[in-house]
Amino acid sequence: RIKLANSNKSAIRFMNSLIIVSIIISVSIFLVIYFLTKEIIFILASGFDPDTIEIAIKLTRITSFSLMFMIINSILGAFLQVNRNFFIPAIIIIPEQIVLITSILIGSTYTYTYLGYGYMFSYLVGFLILFIFSNLKGYRFSCKVADLFELKKFLFLVTPVFITVFANDLNVIIDRTLASRIMPGGISIFNYASTINNFMITIIVFSISTIMLPQLAKLFSNNEKQKAVKVFEENSIIT
C-alpha cells in the first residue's frame, strides 16, 4: 500500500523500520530467554528429568538467537513476494534444511551442541540468500526510520493477528507441557501428531495464501475491490 500510495523508497524505508524494530524486540527476547532459560524450561517442560532439562537449557540458549533471523527472513520473504518473486521464499527451506540435517549428522557423531548451532546457522543461511535476492529487487538497508504514523497504523492492523497467534501458541505450550508429564517422549509424540494434522494445511493453504495475499493487497490499494473479490473467490474454490 505504501509503495503504491507514495513511492518505492518510502516502502523500503518502512520495511527497514520494521527490521530495526524486529531486531530490538528479538534481541530483548533473546536476553530474557538467555538469563531465564532454566525457569522457562521448567514452565514449558516440567516433566523432563534433570539430564534432559540440562540439555534443553543449553540448546535453548544457543537457538534463541535465531529468532532475529527468523523474523527478518519473514520480512524479506514478504518483500520478494510483493515484488512477484515467489520462487526464492518457497525454496528457501531447502538450503536451511540441508544445513540443519548436516548439523544433526555432525551432532550425532560428536556432541548435541552442534545441533543448536546448526539450527541457528540454517536461518543465517536463509537470511543471506533472501538478503541477496532482495537487493537484486532494489532493496537497500538503511537506518532511516519511516513515518511513525505508518508504524502505528501497521501495529494497529496486526494486533488482532498477534492475539490470535499468541492464543494458538499458548494452547500448544500447554499441550506440550502436559505431554512432557505423561510419559518419556510425550512431546515428540505430540509433535509428530501435529505434523500429520498440519500436513495438508501447510501444502494447500500456505501455498495459495502466499500467492494470493500480495495480489489482494495490491488490488485493494488500487481500489479494485471487484477484482479482489473475484481473486478471493477463485482461490477459495481451490481450497
Image (spheres, grey):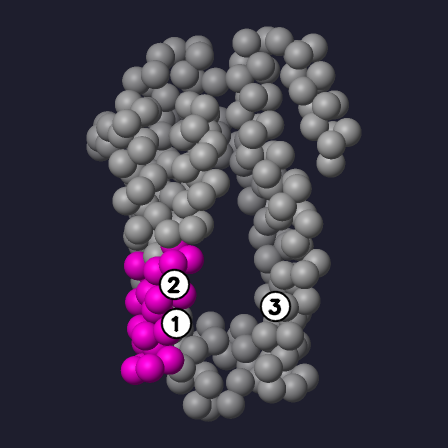
Q: As displayed, is residue 66 above or below residue 72?
A: below
Q: Main secondary structure of the magenta part?
A: helix
Give the amino acid at mark 3: Asn
Give the CA distance from mark 2 to mark 1.
6 Å
Is residue 128 visible in the rendered image? The answer is yes
* Residue at the (39%, 72%) spot, across then down: 104
Residue 10 horizontal/vertical position (percent):
33, 18
Q: Of callouts 2 and 3, which one flags the residue occurring earlier in the amino acid sequence?
A: 2
- Residue of label 1: 104
How crowded pointer 2 is (Cα within 10 Å; few <14, some 14-19, many 20+) is rated as many
Q: Could you say which is closer to the camera, residue 229 or residue 166?
A: 229
Q: Which mark is residue 100?
A: 2
Q: Residue at x 42, y 23 (%)?
A: 83
On the image, the x and y values in percent for residue 24 come to: 31, 47
Q: Amino acid at mark 1?
A: Ile
* Residue where numbered disc 3 is placed: 191
Asked if residue 8 is positioned above or below residue 34 in the image, the reply reads above
Front: mark 2 or 3 = 2
Query: How many numbered tags mark residues here?
Result: 3
Question: Most extreme residue toward the bottom, as rendered?
Answer: 50
**Label 3: how many Cα within 10 Å (few below 14, some 14–19, many 20+):** some
- Which amino acid type corresponds to the residue marked 2 in the rendered image? Leu
Residue 48 tag number: none
Is there a contact, CB below 8 Å, between mark 2 and mark 1?
Answer: yes
Judged from the image, the secondary structure of the residue bearing numbered disc 1 is helix
- Of residues 87 and 4, the one drawn nearer to the viewer in this rendering: 87
Quarter-of-image position of residue 61: bottom left
The residue at 34%/69% (across/down) is 103
Residue 39 left/right relative to 233? left
Q: Which residues are magenta?
A: 96-121
Q: Secondary structure at mark 2?
A: helix
